[in-house]
Image: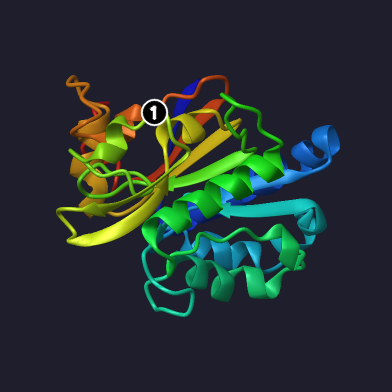
Amino acid sequence: MSEIIRLADAEAVAHEAARRWVEIAQAAVAERGAFRIALSGGNTPRRLYELMASAPWRDQAPWPQTFVFWGDERRVPPSHPDSDYRMARETLLDHVPVPPDHIFRMLGEELANSAKQDYEEKLRRHFGLRAGEWPRFDMILLGLGKDGHIASIFPGTRAVSDLSNMVVVYEVPQLRSERMTLTFPVINHARNIIFLVTGEEKAPALAAVFGDVQKPSTFPAQGVQPVDGSLVWLVDEAAASLLKK
């Protein structure tokens, strides 16, 4: 199931995302005893994290039963200004009672192979995976890059076509830097996938993703196709301005 929800502005997108976060988390804990989420980096989710760290959302979320992962990470130490972990810690995790051993960061400072193996092992242990199984997150947050990338799956890179690994660490040619990311199979096995897309600079990419040409190698966001879950796009009017009515 895929749904586009158009909201007035970025603030409205953040509030709707917070409402859904609490709703999904409460249901997950009631049904399975835990809520497992993979966070997004970049600037778009910052306001959502700030809301979740404040009333009333902070008081409604089941933090002691929440387990936090990341969808991708820059290849930098956790103290670096570009670290997705640092952004989430400063805006959210330092302000809510998530147990420290429930936080699973990507080791952006480690060697590529070590970082990949470490995160895949964390996923295997936590989700109790057997050979051939994929983790099943309750919720994965995603943003949309101006070039159509999601997490750190960039157009024309090997991350687009990797359907066998859970984690890829690679050099993104267009950035001339390394990134670490969950792969499409992990993303697509989530119970709930929520995109946050705001600002007119994202309008061309959003229109392309929902256009007539389906080519995930060029627009990786098109590769987000849930196996057995829901896909919701929360977009503001500026980002949705070029969508076909």
Q: Is residue 56 visible?
A: no
Q: Where residue 173 sits in the image (x, y, percent)? A: 16, 53
Graded by Cα atoms within 10 Å as few (under 14), some (14 to 19) or many (20 or more), the crowding at tag 1 reads: few
Q: Where residue 16 sits in the image (x, y, percent)? A: 56, 47
Q: Is residue 60 above or below residue 33?
A: below
Image check: 147 left or right of 94? left
Examine the image and state in which quarter residue 150 appears: top left
Looking at the image, what colour scheme do you see? Answer: rainbow
Image check: 151 left or right of 71? left
User: In this view of the protein, which residue sits in the foreground, 63 or 84?
Assistant: 84
User: In this view of the protein, which residue sits in the foreground, 177 or 25?
Assistant: 177
Q: Where residue 239 sits in the image (x, y, percent)? A: 29, 46
Image check: 5 left or right of 242? right
Task: Provide the residue designation for mark 1.
Answer: 163
Q: Is residue 112 visible?
A: yes
Tell me what residue is drawn at x 34 percent, y 28 percent: 223
Image check: 39 left or right of 82? right
Q: Is residue 155 above or below residue 52?
A: above
Tell me what residue is drawn at x 25 percent, y 38 percent: 158
Q: How many marks?
A: 1
Examine the image and state in which quarter residue 129 appears: top right
Q: Amino acid at mark 1?
A: Leu
User: In this view of the protein, which residue sits in the foreground, 227 or 92?
Assistant: 227
- Dot 1 falls on a residue whose secondary structure is loop
Q: Is residue 163 above or below residue 179?
A: above
For the C terminus, the quadrant is top left
Tell me what residue is drawn at x 19 percent, y 19 percent: 212
